[in-house]
């Protein structure tokens, strides 16, 4: 069964391009974006790793640590980084896990528990389900899961938008409507009664229907 939103993100130890880590200790009190790749030196993933490197300052502003994963050894990640810098203009500036024993991919339900063998003999197609994005909160719980096929590059601006929503709604009892962006109106959460809402929002709210209570974004 796939990991569900609200589940504790499995802890693990792994070798990364920045040394060995224990995942929960590495998270600390931060938010985390964990994103995975089926194989080094693959074209779509090359563009993704470069795009994320360029966007890292935006994740830093939000207190989000980045952690990549590929089912290949760390020394290949380092060689791949040279290609990424050459073709994308930026090399990975965040750690990348070398998941050569498939441990993390199995823990996060991206590969079957029966997966075994030499990673060098596996193709990207063999690992095609290792294409997930997990957003994990400081409480070590999974807040969002996105799964992409190998032929569709990830939209990191959408992931940033989702993190903006997740972080705000974790602090305030609101929800964000379709296509919401920073600064736009939000919806009072259904768990807030009208009486509570009157105390929180003394200026009132717009309500096209009683169950849709719209207010400015909390600051």
Image: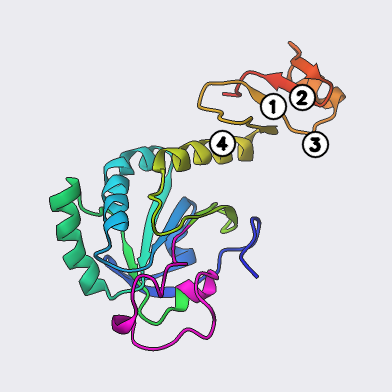
**Residue 96 higher or lower than 138, as above or below:** below
Residue placed under numbered mark 1 in the picture? 187
SS type, badge 1: strand
CA gap, disc 2 to disc 3?
12 Å
Looking at the rendered image, the disc whose residue lies closer to the viewer, 2 or 3, is: 2
Task: Using the image, tell me which numbered label, if any, was put on residue 165.
Answer: 4
**Among the two numbered marks 2 and 1 on one chain, the one whose residue lies closer to the N terminus:** 1
Measured as percent of width and height from the top left, residue 72 is found at 31, 74
The region drawn magenta spans 105-132
In magenta segment, residue 109:
yes
CA gap, disc 1 to disc 4?
12 Å
**Among the two numbered marks 3 and 4 on one chain, the one whose residue lies closer to the N terminus:** 4
Residue placed under numbered mark 3 in the picture? 191
Which residue is found at the position 55% from the left and 69% from the top?
10
**Among the two numbered marks 2 and 4 on one chain, the one whose residue lies closer to the N terminus:** 4
Tell me the quarter of the picture where residue 199 sits: top right
Measured as percent of width and height from the top left, residue 190 is found at 79, 34
Kindly check if marks 2 and 1 are in contact, taking CB atoms under 8 A apart as contact. Answer: yes
Kindly check if marks 2 and 3 are in contact, taking CB atoms under 8 A apart as contact. Answer: no
Looking at the rendered image, the disc whose residue lies closer to the viewer, 2 or 4, is: 2
**Residue 184 higher or lower than 116, as above or below:** above
Q: Quadrant of the N terminus?
A: bottom right
Near mark 1 (Cα within 10 A), the count class, few <14, some 14-19 or many ≥20, is: many
């Amino acid at each position: 069964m796939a990991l569900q939103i609200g589940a504790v993100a499995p802890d693990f130890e792994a070798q990364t391009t920045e040394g060995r880590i224990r995942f929960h200790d590495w998270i600390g009190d931060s938010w985390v974006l964990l994103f995975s790749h089926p194989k080094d030196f693959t074209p779509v993933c090359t563009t993704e790793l470069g795009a994320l490197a360029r966007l890292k300052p935006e994740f830093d502003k939000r207190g989000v640590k980045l952690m990549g994963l590929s089912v290949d050894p760390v020394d290949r990640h380092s060689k791949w980084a040279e290609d990424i810098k050459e073709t994308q203009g930026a090399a990975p500036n965040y750690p990348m896990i070398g998941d050569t024993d498939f441990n993390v991919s199995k823990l996060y339900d991206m590969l079957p528990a029966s997966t075994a063998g030499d990673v060098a003999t596996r193709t990207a197609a063999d690992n095609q389900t290792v294409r997930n994005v997990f957003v994990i909160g400081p409480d070590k719980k999974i807040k969002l899961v996105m799964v992409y096929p190998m032929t569709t590059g990830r939209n990191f601006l959408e992931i940033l938008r989702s993190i903006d929503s997740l972080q705000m709604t974790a602090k305030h009892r609101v929800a964000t409507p379709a296509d919401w962006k920073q600064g736009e109106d939000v919806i009072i959460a259904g768990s807030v009664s009208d009486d509570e809402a009157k105390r929180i929002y003394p200026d009132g709210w717009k309500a096209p229907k009683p169950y849709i209570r719209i207010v400015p974004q909390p600051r």
